[in-house]
């Protein structure tokens, strides 16, 4: 699909991995992806109030046999760290995290910069694998990220920066 | 009513309903383990605040199962958005029980806001939860256990003298998922 948008490429990766349970906290760059998820009858979409809550709901859904993804901005990673360690880490619960990574090239909001800089290092410190694909490889990387999460029983992050969402294919 | 008495009733009713049961961090899970351990209990040993969310995720993923979560006042105050999300999803197969003793019972009984002005049942109503009940006696707990939504149970301060849970986190989730998701690759 050479004419897929970046959001469609991510969505197709989620479909290819069989993701069927998605929790979300919005980011402006996730708006098209959230619409695609919400419109898909094979995906249960649960909008949540805070990312940490979404980590808990996803853990429950995984224990109910579902393939789970959390859509959020990287600011939400900061809200989720204890849960990712003391719930997913402790019980070895997989989770695909599709993260809009703000604060880098093209950022216009100063408040996004501190967490934007810290995000890769926070993930590394937690031992959470992370990937930053370009749109052309996004479908494959997203599908592979869930497979890695399930096989390794760990959260896996796909970081998608401002340039990613602006790219045309 | 002592909290362990409420937990005993909940454990028996959950078992008779064939329900999946999520236990809150700290002494509540230890008391549940002591009075009614079963493979269909998930003991949440960390992630304070998320017992209600784990229960909601289970209920949404497994609409044919009955799911009950036991939470506490301090933990729900830490994740108040959970009440709005529960109301928004409104699953018929899920009951969130909040054992309200007005304090952080596992850390030295420091008072929570429910010991003064906060009212979790009213907060649940305000969040839009369709069925909200308050129980103070064993009989009320038993009869309200058939419901969905939120049940606030007023209990006394104090922990029972019960041992720590003898299971590892791996054992807890593996035996639980053998029930909840028997065809899952990781169960």
Image (cartoon, helix red, strand yellow):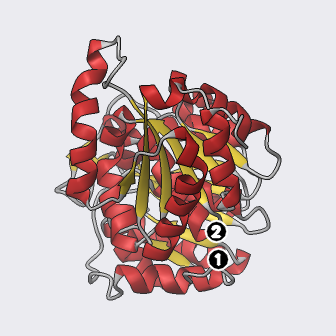
Camera-side residue of A76 and B155: A76
**Residue drawn at (62%, 32%), measured in percent from left and top?**
A169
Q: Which residue sits furthest top?
A: A108
Which chain letter matches label 1? B
Viewer can see residue A136: yes
Do tag 1 and tag 2 residues touch (Cβ < 8 Å)? yes
Using the rendered view, name the quadrant where residue A100 is placed: top left
**Rendered image: mark on residue B180:** 1
Viewer can see residue B80: no
The 10 Å Cα crowd at callout 2, few under 14, some 14 to 19, many 20 or more, is many
Both marks 1 and 2 on one chain: no
Identify the secondary structure beneath mark 1.
Answer: helix
Give the x, y percent position of residue A60.
56, 62
Q: Quadrant of the C terminus of chain B?
A: bottom right
**Residue drawn at (45%, 68%), measured in percent from left and top?**
A93
**Rendered image: mark on residue B23:** none
- Residue where numbered disc 2 is placed: A64
Give the x, y percent position of residue B168.
34, 84
**Residue drawn at (70%, 31%), measured in percent from left and top?**
A35
Give the x, y percent position of residue A45.
68, 44
Q: Is residue B181 above or below residue A107?
A: below
The 10 Å Cα crowd at callout 1, few under 14, some 14 to 19, many 20 or more, is many
Q: Is residue B163 above or below residue B86?
A: below
Camera-side residue of B184 and A57: B184
């Amino acid at each position: 699909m050479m004419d897929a948008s970046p959001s469609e490429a991510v969505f197709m990766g989620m479909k290819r991995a069989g993701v069927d349970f998605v929790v979300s906290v919005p980011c402006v760059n996730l708006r098209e992806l959230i619409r695609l998820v919400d419109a898909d009858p094979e995906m249960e979409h649960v909008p949540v109030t805070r990312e940490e809550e979404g980590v808990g709901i996803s853990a429950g859904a995984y224990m109910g046999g579902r393939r789970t993804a959390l859509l959020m901005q990287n600011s939400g990673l900061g809200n989720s760290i204890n849960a990712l360690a003391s719930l997913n880490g402790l019980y070895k619960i997989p989770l695909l995290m599709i993260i809009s990574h703000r604060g880098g090239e093209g950022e216009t909001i100063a408040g996004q910069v501190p967490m934007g800089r810290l995000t890769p290092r926070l993930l590394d410190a937690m031992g959470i694998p992370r990937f930053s694909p370009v749109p052309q490889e996004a479908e494959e990387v997203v599908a592979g990220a869930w497979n890695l999460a399930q096989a390794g029983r760990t959260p896996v992050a796909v970081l998608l920066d401002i340039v990613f969402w602006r790219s045309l294919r | 009513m002592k909290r362990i008495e409420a937990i005993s009733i909940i454990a028996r009713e959950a078992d008779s309903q064939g329900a999946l049961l999520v236990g809150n961090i700290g002494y509540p899970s230890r008391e549940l383990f002591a009075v009614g351990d079963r493979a269909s209990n998930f003991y949440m040993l960390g992630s304070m605040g998320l017992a209600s969310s784990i229960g909601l995720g289970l209920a949404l993923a497994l609409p044919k199962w009955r799911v009950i979560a036991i939470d506490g006042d301090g933990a729900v105050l830490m994740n108040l958005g959970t009440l709005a999300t529960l109301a928004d999803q409104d699953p018929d197969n899920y009951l969130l029980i909040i054992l309200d003793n007005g304090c952080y019972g596992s850390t030295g009984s420091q008072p929570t806001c429910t010991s003064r002005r906060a009212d979790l049942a009213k907060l649940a109503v305000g969040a839009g939860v369709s069925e909200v009940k308050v129980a103070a006696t064993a009989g009320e707990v038993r009869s309200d256990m058939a419901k969905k939504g939120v049940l606030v149970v007023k209990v006394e301060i104090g922990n029972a003298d019960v041992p720590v849970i003898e299971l590892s986190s791996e054992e807890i989730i593996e035996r639980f998922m053998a029930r909840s998701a028997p065809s899952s690759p990781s169960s």
